[in-house]
Image (tube, rainbow, N blue to C red):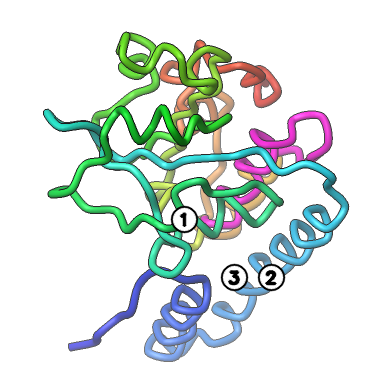
Amino acid sequence: MIGLRYGTQEYLEQWIQMFATLLQRQERGQQILQRMHETIVSLEAFAAERDSSPTVLFLRSAGDSGYNAGMSSSRGYMNTWMTLCGATNIGADIDYSTSNATSVEQLLAWDPEIIFVSSMTALTPAELYADSALSELRAVKNHKVYAVPSGGFWWDPPSAESHLTMMWAAQIAYPDAATYDLREQMRDNYDFLYGYSLSEDEIDQILRFDDNAEAQGYDQFSR
């Protein structure tokens, strides 16, 4: 049995190194980490040049008492990919809990500019747009609610695809400044990770164009 710690980039890298060693594929593990490190260094440099920091919030699910919101800076990997580009996680002090939903009143007080909706649950941007209680949120009014992609694995928790999530989030937060060709990055990385050639339709499906149909600026990812 192997015990894995969760929640940070450091832990993710430990997983990769551990399994690469177990499989006697250390070189392969280093290649995966190199791609991640190149993206992280690129985004750290990008963030250092920003003179603005849009507020972002991660929502995982909805319940009778509110929305399961927040992803703390100490325990939540979602905080990593949301903020690496220079954005500010407005829920960084909140630990996600399915038994302790964040009230609509708290969401209105935070008033995030951008909301990311998890790929791991049934919650969609359309549900937030349809919730009249959230109609005054800037992210809702401006249609800046984005469904997180889902590919070989969900893109919100840590995985070998997490550097793609980092690029995607940067382009959401800074659509006029972040210049990744995400579709090409996806094609290259899926070939590297899985030996699989993505079709244009598959890329659209991974990026959840149906769920993000109303999202402002999402056409930057169009084919």
| Residue to which mark 3 is pinned | 32
| Residue to which mark 1 is pinned | 92
Residue 61 image position (x, y, % from top left): 25, 36
Q: Which mark is drawn over residue 56?
A: none
Asked if 27 appears above or below 184 in the picture, the reply is below
The residue mark sitting in front, 1 or 2, is 1
Query: Tag 3's secondary structure?
Result: helix
Asked if 12 appears above or below 96 in the picture, the reply is below
Which sits earlier in the primary sequence, circle 1 or circle 3?
A: 3
- Viewed as shown, does residue 5 lie left or right of 16? left
Which sits earlier in the primary sequence, circle 3 or circle 2?
A: 3
Q: Is residue 40 magenta?
A: no
* Residue 187 visible (yes or no): no
Residue 4 image position (x, y, % from top left): 30, 80
Three-letter amino acid code of the residue under disc 2: His
Three-letter amino acid code of the residue under disc 3: Ile
Q: Which residues are magenta?
A: 162-183
* Quadrant assignment for the N terminus: bottom left
- Viewed as shown, does residue 39 lie left or right of 137? right
| Residue to which mark 2 is pinned | 37
Q: Residue at position x 51%, y 11% from top?
A: 214
Circle 2 crowding by C-alpha within 10 Å: few under 14, some 14–19, many from 20: few
CB under 8 Å between callouts 1 and 2?
A: no
Q: Locate residue 36: give its quadrant.
A: bottom right
In the displayed orientation, state which residue is furthest to the right: 49
Q: Locate residue 157: give its quadrant.
A: bottom left
Q: Residue at position x 81%, y 29% from top?
A: 176
Asked if 122 appears above or below 14 in the picture, the reply is above
Circle 1 crowding by C-alpha within 10 Å: few under 14, some 14–19, many from 20: many
- Nearer the observer, 223 or 85: 85
Q: Is residue 171 magenta?
A: yes
